[in-house]
Image: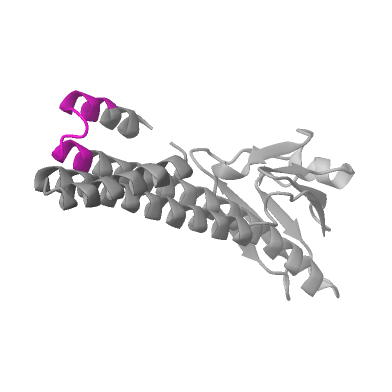
């Protein structure tokens, strides 16, 4: 139901309750007043939810249009290219050295929602790395020299440009964590919305605005979402 319609019904019920009070129909007055209060609470909650969603959108404005490429280099592992898209990352390792280190498997694309954690060790005296932990999976090993290597680890050597390369690694980490944080907020918010709707339905049932059958039907719809 659109907010404008709810506002009109709320206003109408409030006016009717005042009219019933004037003509001394106390019972009807209370009924319409309760309905108007419930509708007022619904309107207020909808406005709060809308404001919260707008804040989230502003906080993660940069996330929605991310399409960037990062390059990491290592003497032992060769060149690694990380492409960061709106909802996934693609890891590719061109060059002969990379093929010897990680095999000939080509590009690997990972959905960001499946990444449970990102660990970054910044390059300093020793080389740095980014490691992605994927939910519910065992890291694949590949490579034909010096044993198998984890496909979800990207190494980068220490150099005179450590600050820039470390910033790139941390940007990838921050983007993934922000992306998954936003998804978690949306899940929690949807659950809160459903429980709030259920509470309001119970209030409507208590004042006989809806029947028990209607309440149970709407309850099942909300709990199944």
Which span of residues is magenta-colored? 202-217
Which residue lies at the image location 59% right of the left edge and 57% below the top edge?
A: 178
Q: Nearer the viewer, residue 57 or 181?
A: 57
- For the question of whether residue 151 can be seen, the reply is yes
Q: Where is the N terminus found, in terms of image quarters?
A: top left
Figure check: 148 above or below 222: below
Q: Is residue 79 left or right of residue 198?
A: right
Residue at image point 70% right, 57% down: 62
Residue 174 % position (x, y)? 63, 61
| Left or right of residue 143, residue 110 in this image | left
> Residue 12 location, x and y as percent?
34, 44
Return the residue nearer the eye: 197 or 30.
30
Q: Residue furthest front?
A: 23
Please provide percent x and percent y for residue 213. 19, 23
Name the quadrant containing residue 173.
bottom right
Q: Is residue 159 above or below residue 96?
A: below
Residue under the point 32% across and 53% down: 41
- Give the quarter of the figure containing the C terminus: top left
- In the image, taking residue 156 as reference, residue 216 lies left or right, namely left
**Residue 69 magenta-drawn?**
no
Q: In the image, is residue 218 above or below residue 197?
A: above
Residue 191: tell me if it is visible. Answer: no
Residue 212 covered by magenta stretch: yes
- On the image, the x and y values in percent for residue 209 come to 21, 34
């Amino acid at each position: 139901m659109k907010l404008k319609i709810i506002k009109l019904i709320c206003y109408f019920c409030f006016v009717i309750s005042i009219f019933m009070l004037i003509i001394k129909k106390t019972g009807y007055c209370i009924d319409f007043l309760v309905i108007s209060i419930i509708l007022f609470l619904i309107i207020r909650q909808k406005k709060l939810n809308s404001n919260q969603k707008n804040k989230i959108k502003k906080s993660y404005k940069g996330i929605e249009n991310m399409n960037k490429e990062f390059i990491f280099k290592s003497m032992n592992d060769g060149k690694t290219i990380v492409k960061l898209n709106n909802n996934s990352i693609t890891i590719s390792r061109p060059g002969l050295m990379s093929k010897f280190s990680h095999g000939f498997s080509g590009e690997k694309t990972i959905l960001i929602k499946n990444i449970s954690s990102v660990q970054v060790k910044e390059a300093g005296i020793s080389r740095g790395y980014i490691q992605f932990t994927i939910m519910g999976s065992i890291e694949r090993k590949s490579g034909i020299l010096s044993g198998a290597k984890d496909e979800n680890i990207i190494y980068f050597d220490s150099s005179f440009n450590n600050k820039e390369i470390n910033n790139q690694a941390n940007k990838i980490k921050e983007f993934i964590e922000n992306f998954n944080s936003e998804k978690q907020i949306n899940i929690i918010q949807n659950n809160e919305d459903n429980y709030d709707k259920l509470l309001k339905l119970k209030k409507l049932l208590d004042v006989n605005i809806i029947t028990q059958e209607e309440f149970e039907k709407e309850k099942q719809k909300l709990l199944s979402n």
